[in-house]
Image: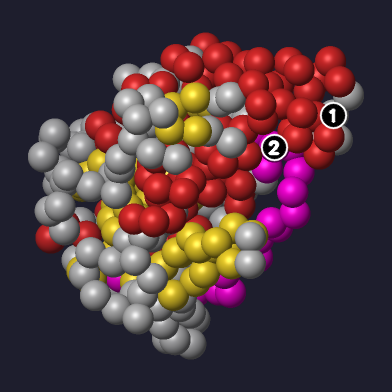
Amino acid sequence: MSTTPTIFKRPRASYTVVGGSHRAGPDDLSVLLLARGGRFYREEQLRELSALPNVQILSVEGPSPAYDLEELARRHPAIRFLLLRSPASPGEKINLGIEEALSERILVLWSDMRDEGDSLGSQQRELLCQVPRLKSPKGELLPSILVPAMIKGSLKVLPWKPAQEGMRSLYPFDYCGLYSRQRFQQLGGYDPWMTNPYWQKMDFGFRAGLWGETIAWHPRLQLAYTGEPAGEDSTPDASYKLFFLKNLAVRFTGDSGLLPLSRLPRYALRSGSALLDCLKEFREVRAWVHENRFRFQGDLPSLLGRWEMPE
C-alpha cells in the first residue's frame, strides 16, 4: 500500500476494463503495455505476448483508444485492456496498471517495442526495478543508463550505455523495466501531480535513491524500438518545482529527512508562484517530507557521493 500522504493523493484516473479472462498466479509475470504510436506492429506484438505461458497481459489505452479495440479484445481474450476516460501521464498509467497486476513482477514496455530478451528469467526480486538494454530501430545500443552528477555546480544526468550487470540507473529510461510490485507501491509509485514525464521520472528515481531503493540494469532484459524514441522536455516547470522541494531541497539529519524553513526564501524568489501559492506549496511538501522523514536514508550530496561514475 502506498505511503504517500493524503496531500499528494489525487482522484485516480477512471477507466473501464475490456477483456482479460486469463488470470495469472502470484508467481507469474505481468506485462504492462502502454499504448503509443501507430498500429503497424501492434497485432504481431499482441499475438506474441498472448502466446507467453502463465503471463498476465495488461494494455493501457486511451482516452482515445484504437478504433478496433473491441476487435483486438475479441482476437486476444487473454489481454486485459484498461480504457482510460481522461488523459493521464505515463506514470499514472503505470500506477493503474501495477494496481491491476496480479503478479509481483511487472514488465513495463510501450506498444512500439519488441521484447528481445528473457523477462521470465530475471529473478532479482530484491530490486525496485531492473532496467533493460534498449536498441534503436536500426539495432543500435542506446545510452539508457542514467547517472546523476554535479558538474560546475549544476545537477546533470548523464546517459551511458549499459556495460556490466548491476550497473545502477537513476531512473528507468522511458519508464521501461521489470518492476517489483511491492517495492513500487511502498515507494508510492509515480507522482500523479507531475504532468511532465521528464520530471516525473526524475522524482521517481531520486525518491528511490534517497529512500534506499535500487534501479539497476539486467542483461537478460532486452527491448527494441520499432519507431524513434520520444523526445523529452527538461524545461523547469510546475513539475520541476515539486521535484525540487521533494528531493533536492531535503536535508538528511542523520536518521531522518527534513525540508528546512531556510529553503523557503530561495524557493519563493525562484518559483515564479505568487507568495500565498508559494507558501502553500512549501507547507504541503514540508508536511509530506515530515510524514516520510524516516524513509530518507540520505540527501543529494550523499546520494551523488555513493554513485560511481561508469568507466
Range drawn in magenta: 222-243
Tell me which residue sits at (23%, 47%) in the image. 127
State the residue at coordinates (76%, 43%).
237
Q: What residue type is labelled 1?
A: Ser
Image quadrant in which the N terminus is located = top left
Q: Is residue 233 magenta?
A: yes
Residue receiving disc 2: 241
Q: Where is residue 207 in the image (x, y as percent from the top left)?
A: 44, 39
Query: Does residue 94 appear anywhere in the picture?
Result: no
Callout 1 touching callout 2 (CB < 8 Å): yes
Given residues 29 and 272, the one toward you in this image is 272
Characterize the local packing of mark 1: few (<14), some (14-19) or many (20 or more) Cα atoms within 10 angstroms. some
Q: Nearer the viewer, residue 161 or 12?
A: 161
Q: Distance between the residues labelled 1 and 2?
A: 10 Å
Q: Which residue corresponds to the image point at 49% horizontal and 71% vertical from the top-left?
A: 159
Residue 2 lies, in percent from the top left, at: 38, 22
Seen as rendered, the residue at the extreme right is 274
- Mark 1 or mark 2, which has the lower sequence index? 2
Q: Which residue is drawn at 83% across and 34% down?
A: 269
**Residue identifier under label 1:** 273
Image vertical order of residue 149 relative to residue 203, above or below = below
In which quarter of the view is residue 25 placed?
top left
* Residue type indicated by callout 2: Lys
Figure check: 51 above or below 203: below
Q: Nearer the viewer, residue 310 or 131?
A: 310
Q: Is residue 120 left or right of residue 304?
A: left
